[in-house]
Amino acid sequence: MTTDRARRVLIVEDETSLADSIRYNLEREGYAVDVAYDGRDALRRARLEPPDLVLLDLMLPEMAGLDVCRTLRAESNVPIIMVTAKDAEADKVAGLELGADDYVTKPFSMRELVARVSANLRRVATAVPAQEQPEDILEGGPVRLDVSRHEATVRGQPVDFRPKEFELISTFLRRMGRLLTREFLIEEVWGPGYYGDMKTLDVHIRRIRTKIEEDPHRPVHLVTVRGLGYKYTDE
């Protein structure tokens, strides 16, 4: 993402009045905004002019939001914030497991939404470039990360960690054996001022365990410290 232009947000929302309201509030904050009213058009627009962030409603015509999320994540690392109905718990979890970075629940305040967009974009903008990482190779237990190449192996086999998963596992490997609180992990990976709940972190931890643990239900490397957080052990 460049710094000499307005950061671009793609809104994917079929409710015209809501899309217009979101556009107005984001443009007031200086963002360049594009709007798609169905899933297929969202993919077309994202491919034509890749956005810096996608705000994705899950209830869409033409192509379901979860399918849009899956396709976007397969094609890029663009931050994705899902918009879900208040009682759509399964959709929240499914979207996070497909690689979405965050979610907001309808109804939401525009102030909260703008803050979530800003926090996710700020996290991307302030990420340390690969060549400036203090360590290019991180190893612990069955995991080996090549930070500069954004590549990972588990027990010698290539594994695809999604962007937030990669940030989380690298955070653990750099702090091997130390207790990391849930609050620390959220701030480290999602950025300060994160307005979401801890479910986002829980889903990503669960996904990492399915990729690194021989038995994800009985983890020996990425372990829970009940009531406090998590730690990664090199056993």
Image (spheres, grey):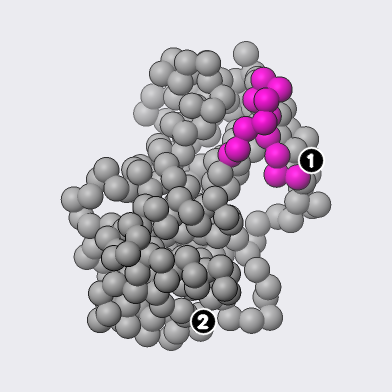
Residue 136 — which label? 1
Position of 89 relative to 109 (above/below): above
Where residue 162 sits in the image (x, y, percent)? 56, 44
Quarter of the image with the C terminus is top right
| Helix, strand or loop for disc 2 | strand
Name the side, left or right, on which 104 lies relative to 41.
Answer: left
Where residue 18 sits in the image (x, y, percent)? 27, 77
Image point 77% across, 46% down: which residue?
A: 148
Name the side, left or right, on which 191 lies relative to 57.
Answer: right
Using a 10 Å C-alpha cutoff, classify the residue at mark 1 as few (fewer than 14 neighbours), some (14 to 19) or many (20 or more).
some
Using a 10 Å C-alpha cutoff, classify the residue at mark 2 as few (fewer than 14 neighbours), some (14 to 19) or many (20 or more).
some
Position of 29 relative to 198 (above/below): below
Task: Choose mark 2 or mark 1, whichever is in front.
Answer: 2
Range of magenta residues: 149-161
Three-letter code, disc 1: Asp
Observer able to see residue 231: no
Residue receiving disc 2 = 32
Give whichever of discs 2 and 1 has the lower sequence position.
2
Where residue 79 sits in the image (x, y, percent)? 51, 59
Observer able to see residue 178: yes
Position of 222 relative to 20 (above/below): above
Name the side, left or right, on which 36 lies relative to 78.
Answer: left
Quarter of the image with the N terminus is bottom right
Image point 45% across, 84% down: which residue?
A: 27
Image point 56% across, 65% down: which residue?
A: 122
Three-letter code, disc 2: Ala
Position of 216 relative to 76 (above/below): above
| Camera-nearest residue between 205 and 172 | 205
